[in-house]
Amino acid sequence: MARNVRYRGGEIDIVAGDGAVLVFVEVRARTRPGLAGASIDGAKRSKIRLAAQRYLLQQVRGPWPACRFDAVVVEGGAVQWLRSAFDANEE
């Protein structure tokens, strides 16, 4: 649906649909194992949630769809898709 959506204070790498669910995807790549997923810390998750909220306000007319936050982690050439990597309401 969209790539590299930027707002003041945050960005979303990929916005996609999975049936009726709107999926916001963070993509992280690192050469050393274990660092890509760990780099999506609380501050980064907050920025992604804020950007997702702004996206919904600007792009969705009517009721907001169910949403999910995924991550694609690339480490040492291996790609892993983490469905529901974090919750929209977590701190």
Image (cartoon, grey):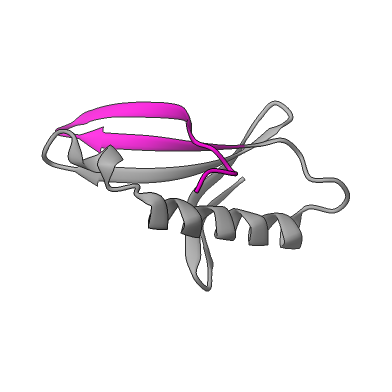
Q: Is residue 13 above or below residue 87?
A: below
Residue 15 appears in the picture as rendered = yes
User: Is 42 displayed left or right of 87 in the figure?
Assistant: left
Residue 31 location, x and y as percent? 13, 41
Residue 11 location, x and y as percent? 48, 60
Label the magenta part by its dominant secondary structure: strand
Q: Which residues are magenta?
A: 68-91
Residue 12 appears in the picture as rendered = no
**Which quadrant of the structure image shows residue 65?**
top right
As for residue 75 lying within the magenta part, the answer is yes
* Total numbered badges shown on the rendered structure: 0
Residue found at the very far bottom of the displayed protein: 8
Q: Nearer the viewer, residue 41 or 27?
A: 41
User: Is 75 displayed left or right of 11 in the figure?
Assistant: left
**Which quadrant of the structure image shows residue 28?**
top left
Residue 25 location, x and y as percent? 48, 42
Q: Nearer the viewer, residue 39 or 55?
A: 39
Residue at 39% x, 28% y is: 81
Residue found at the very far right of the displayed protein: 62
Residue found at the very far front of the displayed protein: 91
As for residue 87 lying within the magenta part, the answer is yes
Residue at 14% x, 33% y is: 33
Q: Is residue 5 above or below residue 15?
A: below
**Which quadrant of the structure image shows residue 1?**
top right
Q: Is residue 14 above or below residue 72?
A: below
Residue at 26% x, 36% y is: 74
